[in-house]
Image (tube, rainbow, N blue to C red):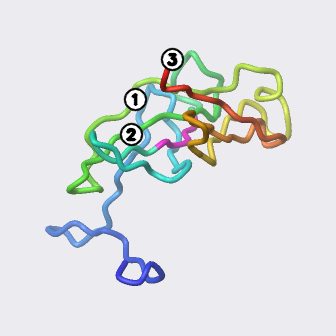
Amino acid sequence: SPDMITWHPVESEESKKRISVLHPRPGMFDSRLVEPGPYALYRDEGIVLIYNASNAANFNDPGLPQFTYAAGQALFDKEKPFKLIDRTNDYFIYPDKEYEKVGEVNEVCFVEGLVYFKEKWFLYYGTADSKIAVAVYDPAK
């Protein structure tokens, strides 16, 4: 965007169709859907996107209940931000506590906010569409 107000979806140079950069995967925790979480991070390795995902009813991750929301991470190329380099095969946060498992919508950890504060990362997430929790990552450990 030249003015940070007007945005245009990225299109394939060959087909002129919009590019979808991340897709659900059969048999995985993200088999039903994927959607962005907090803002992406520009790192030396590339652009890191933390994303929310849902487990499908069929062809899903058998270790999670159907329709569970969990979060994964994807790495995109710095030069071509629409090019996926890698993504996690497993979720890094999922409903395992009672307040994440039971609520308005059961089995939900939905990551939304991320802040670096006092040498630690704080990841804010919705739990069972009922509460907000925070997970902490300390890079020094």
SS category of the residue bearing label 3: loop
Task: Pinpoint residue 117: horizontal percent, then vertical percent.
Answer: 60, 41
**Label 2, label 3: how many angstroms apart (C-alpha)?**
23 Å
**Label 1, label 3: how many angstroms apart (C-alpha)?**
21 Å
Main SS of residues in magenta: strand
Residue plotted at (79% across, 43% down): 129
For label 1, count other residues whose C-alpha is less than 10 Å away and answer few (under 14), some (14-19) or many (20+): few
SS category of the residue bearing label 1: loop
Figure disc tally: 3
SS category of the residue bearing label 2: strand
Q: Name the residue carrying label 1.
A: 88
Task: Tell me, for residue 141, which label it has, or none.
Answer: 3
Most foreground residue, 47 or 37:
47
Corner quadrant of residue 52: top right
> Is the Cβ of the residue at disc 2 closer than 8 Å to that at disc 1?
yes
Write down the region rendered in magenta: 50-54
Residue plotted at (69% across, 25% down): 95
Task: Tell me, for residue 123, which label it has, or none.
Answer: none
**Residue 21 relative to residue 56: left or right:** left
What amino acid type should be assigned to the residue bearing mark 3? Lys
Q: Name the residue carrying label 2.
A: 74
Residue plotted at (76% across, 29% down): 100
What amino acid type should be assigned to the residue bearing mark 2? Ala
